[in-house]
Amino acid sequence: MKRIVASLVFLVMLCAAGTCTANAELRWSKLAFDAPSKIYVSPGYDRDHGLFALVDKHLYLSIDEGKTWDKTASLPVWLVKEEQRNIYTLQGADQDHLAIYKYNPQVEGGWEKICDAPTGTVNFTVLPSGTVIAVKPVYAHRDQWLLQRAASPHYYWQDTGFTSAGEFLASTPDGYVYTREDGTGLISQSTTDGLSWDEVNSVLKSNRFYISPEYSNDKIILSITNNRSVSVSYDSGEHWQERMTDMMSGKYLADLAFSPAYGSDRTIYALDREGHVFTAVNTLVGWKSYDVSADYIDSCEFNSLVVLPGDKILAGASDGIYEVINYIPPAQRAQAYFVIGKNSYTIGQNDWLMDTAPFIDSDRTFVPLRYLAYALGMSDDDIHWDGTKNEATFTKNKTTVKVMVGSRTLTVNKQPSTMDVTPQIRDSRVFLPARWVAEAFEANVSWDGQNKSVIIEYVK
């Protein structure tokens, strides 16, 4: 049988039905700073390799994937916004003297002033037309907000007249503007550069919008809603559907990021405040997750996520900037599924038939010998069955594994270990305990209780 192993765009499943994926090689490691830090990526990263870190109102720039950082703004920075494929900042000595700047590596100092900002501004958005909309609290009361707009090129600030604004403010590449009324959580939309507003079809409390890199084609906007789930709109924010719920047992989401190759792999990354990373593709149904161990103190809280080309993952946290080390990109991983009672299995995105089906015995999943080997990337030449000894031998690269029907001994490169179950023969077929054999080849094994399937993942 010809073996086909497809490249994947998702990672290892988290704990399910009491069984966890072993992923000890993945670890958060401190990269820079020892203070509360947020990280941002330049929308023109493929050209300028720019990464920004906001650390105690100081803004730093790195052009070597975060290895070294240089201060890039002379004034205190109060806010960083990624919009319309640009990086904007709110800078000023204090909140009475603020201005909005655009990152432009072609100008001296790297920052091009757009306009002064209203006193007390806490958020803003820059529209494709050049119009800037800013929001600030009314008389320092955080439950009442004032929206003001200034049109290019003179930027004379005027009240919008909209009285249901909230601190949340975002815009899209086609000029739609969104705010949220803090009292009700309702989202309002303007299609007239902030001159008029209408409520949209949502009762979800959005904390931040994420505009698809392919927005001109798909009109997709993502949102972290109620701090704990991801919602998606396929029509520029008019209607919303929740897509991540109850994934993290009440953990708070910190940030989302699009894959640098989103146009082809359609992959979304999510980060919670404890440092767990999740991925999903296309419809955002079926989020996958993997644990990342950390060498930081327990009180560290993650707040921002960046994914660079090559699937290099960086994050901002309450005590600095971190990176995932020993990470293996999805394209270098292979994944297979066996479903209990089903006589077919999946490798990557391809289904294959079997002449028998996996089963569970003594709380362990048993998979047909030959198909388990295929799922691990082996061919018929890598499998040897000794009928006189009822012994199977598997060889892959520099690893040789031996198991025997009725025996709990598993031998890896002549080193024996003891399994908690024994291989079995059913219907004239040899079945092996999937976890023991797969992990002998350094594969990760997890259990999907909802779909009653065992998931095997390994490095190609």
Image: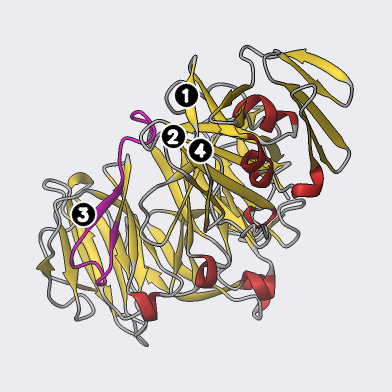
Comparing marks 3 and 1, which lies closer to the viewer? 1
Q: Position of residue 322 (x, y in %)?
A: 64, 41
Mark yes or no: residue 32 visible. no
Q: Earlier in the sequence, mark 2 or mark 3?
A: 3
Q: Residue at x 71, y 34 (%)?
A: 25
Q: Earlier in the sequence, mark 3 or mark 4?
A: 4
The magenta stretch spans which residues?
A: 232-251
Comparing marks 1 and 4, which lies closer to the viewer? 1
403 vs 238, left or right, is right
Q: Are marks 1 and 4 in contact (CB under 8 Å)?
A: no
Label 4 sits on residue? 13
Q: Secondary structure at mark 1?
A: strand
Q: Secondary structure at mark 4?
A: loop
Q: Which mark is residue 360?
A: 1
Distance, label 1 to label 4, CA atoms, is 20 Å
Q: Nearer the viewer, residue 353 or 11?
A: 353
Q: Residue at x 69, y 67 (%)?
A: 49
Q: Secondary structure at mark 2?
A: loop
Distance, label 2 to label 4, CA atoms, is 17 Å
Badge 4: few (under 14), some or many (20 or more) residues near its Cα, within 10 Å? many
